Image (cartoon, rainbow, N blue to C red):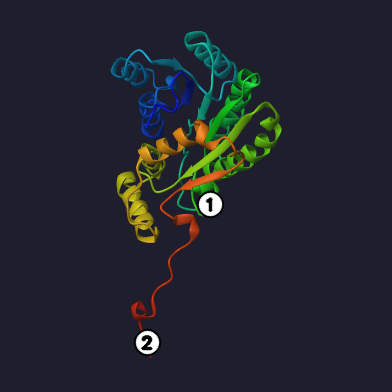
Amino acid sequence: MAEELSGRVAVVTGGAAGLGRATVERLLEDGARVVVADLDRDAGEALVDELGADVRFRHTDVANAEQVRDLIGFAVKKFGGLHLMVNNAGISGAMHTSFLDEDFADFERVLSVNLLGVMTGTREAARQMTAGGGSIVNISSIGGVQAGPGVLAYRASKAAVLHFTKCVAMDLAEYGIRVNCIAPGGIPTRLLTSATGTVEGADGDMMAERIRAHIAATQPLKRLGTPQDVAEAVVYLGGDRSLHITGTVLTIDGGTTAGVKPMRPEQATAPAS
């Protein structure tokens, strides 16, 4: 297959690790030039050293509108334009064993990064795309699609990203700007461990492993998802194969949000007498 994104410029926030890094690597493979935005300066600069001349790093806190504006200006100055914006940066926040223990101490930071960062990134990218169109891909989570306990600020922020994506897709369609959303689930990244590690008196790694085991047990497809699965979807939504797609949410979760497969009759046990 020809390089689908050859000659195009992309920005990936939270691009130094996890889903973001996989996306950066896949975009480069497909011919794009990429600006990586991240708070982790060391990881971002190391990534640039590793991946070569078609990638640049910009230290960026997406919760800061001025820094996001500077990021987009940097990409345009370095590579001459902007065709694809991937709003991937996100944080989990603290996990409490009960909602009654929730103190909302991290609410503002979680919403500032996960929601305002996406909104600001979308706005600044769209301002550069009005003349020639483009694609904006917002990374949400199945935590924003499907209800569940724990990390409620995170879940609320990701649900808001879904609705924002659909609303702004309607607004920007007249400029030929497509805005879509990816909602991953069941993909091993540092985000889950960062949340479970905040539980006081608990082994965060053990809790994360139990959550992953639960996901694996209830996921219809038994194949473990990878960051590369998300990266492939970004390439699709960023290229010309998706020119008639906007305002959609693509779940990449092995079928988790479709529902739990019902038990076969022969698997059911007779009730105790």
Q: Position of residue 47 (x, y in %)?
A: 33, 20
Closest to the observer: 152 or 160? 160
Nearer to us in this view, 86 or 211: 86
Q: Which mark is residue 99?
A: 1
| Quarter-of-image position of residue 255 | bottom left
Q: Is residue 166 above or below residue 81?
A: below
Query: What secondary structure is marked by label 1?
Result: helix
Classify mark 1: residues with Cα within 10 Å, few (<14), some (14-19) or many (20+).
few
Q: In the depicted view, which residue is nearer to us: 46 or 51?
A: 51
Query: Residue 26: x percent and y percent?
Result: 37, 30
Q: Quadrant of residue 2?
A: top left
Residue, x 39% and y 58% (percent of image)?
A: 219
**Coordinates of residue 209 in the picture (x, y in percent):** 31, 50
Residue 102 visible somewhere in the drawing: no
Q: Sequence-wise, which precedes: disc 1 or disc 2?
A: 1
From the viewer's perspective, is 115 left or right of 48? Answer: right
* Label 1 close to label 2 by CB (< 8 Å): no
- What amino acid is at disc 1? Phe
The CA span between labels 1 and 2 is 35 Å
- Label 2: which residue? 272
Instruction: Residue 186: tell me if it is visible.
Output: yes
Q: Is residue 60 shown left or right of residue 160?
A: left
Q: Is residue 43 left or right of residue 259?
A: left
Amino acid carrying label 2: it is Ala
Residue farthest to the front, as pictured: 1
Assess disc 2: are there few (<14), some (14-19) or many (≥20) residues with their C-alpha within 10 Å of its C-alpha.
few
Q: Tell whether 133 sits left or right of 38.
A: right
Q: Residue at x 45, y 16 (%)?
A: 59
Where's residue 163, x and y in %?
63, 42
Of marks 1 and 2, the one in the foreground: 2
